[in-house]
Image (cartoon, rainbow, N blue to C red):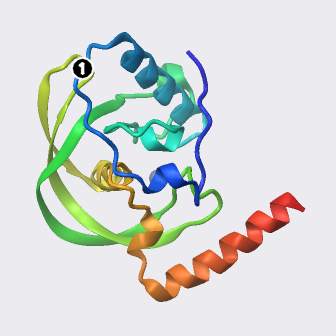
Amino acid sequence: MALLRIRKYPEDILRRQALPVENVRDAELQRLIDDMIETMHDAPGIGLAAPQVGVSRRICVIDVSGSEQPESAGPVHVLINPEILDASEQIVAEEGCLSIPGYHCDVKRYGRVIARYTDRDGNHQEIVATDLLCRAIQHELDHLNGVLFVDRIGSFRKELFKRRYKKSLSQAEA
Ligand SMILES: [Zn+2]
């Protein structure tokens, strides 16, 4: 397994519409999934989408167990070609993103979703998600459509974010 480089805002790949996965049993794809899980745990983060590691494919991994030790982590959800079938309730909670380090903001999301996806063995699955898992699914699915959580915080707060983020980037370079 290998750690992958996490792409950071404003890299272009984060804005692309990711392509569906056709062959789930592909060995290279399985390796990518293992590497994504390792990269997510190492970061540490609770979710990671393939575009965040430079692969424009509809895959994301989620682990909301909150463990930083891979041995005690899990269950890790591997969602391939995920779709939201139904969504209800709106909840505001703080969010962050491995591609936008150091920035957190309140984001309004659905509190309950039903999602359909293919698992890494090629089986079709349906999941009813609430709480953190529900939020993570929506956040990661956004990544597959080139959407970042800062697109969902309103134009005023987004302008503030852009200014602050640019400043922190230039400080990091200095
Ligand atoms: Zn993210």
- Residue 43 in the image: state x and y as whole percent: 60, 39
Residue 97 at least partly seen: yes
Viewer-nearest residue: 64 or 11: 11
* Residue at the image position 27 percent from the left and 52 percent from the top: 134
Res. 166 image quadrant: bottom right
- Residue 168 in the image: state x and y as whole percent: 75, 68
- Residue 95 in the image: state x and y as whole percent: 46, 63
Residue with the most extreme right position: 174
In the rendered view, tell whether residue 75 sits above or below residue 100: above
Residue 49 at least partly seen: no
- Determine whether, in the image, residue 19 is placed left or right of residue 70: left
- Determine whether, in the image, residue 2 is placed left or right of residue 33: right
* Residue at the image position 51 percent from the left and 23 percent from the top: 35
Residue picked out by circle 1: 23
- Determine whether, in the image, residue 100 is placed left or right of residue 125: right
Residue with the most extreme bottom position: 156
* Residue at the image position 37 percent from the left and 20 percent from the top: 29
What is the secondary structure assignment of the residue under circle 1?
loop
Q: Amino acid at mark 1?
A: Asn
* Residue at the image position 55 percent from the left and 15 percent from the top: 1
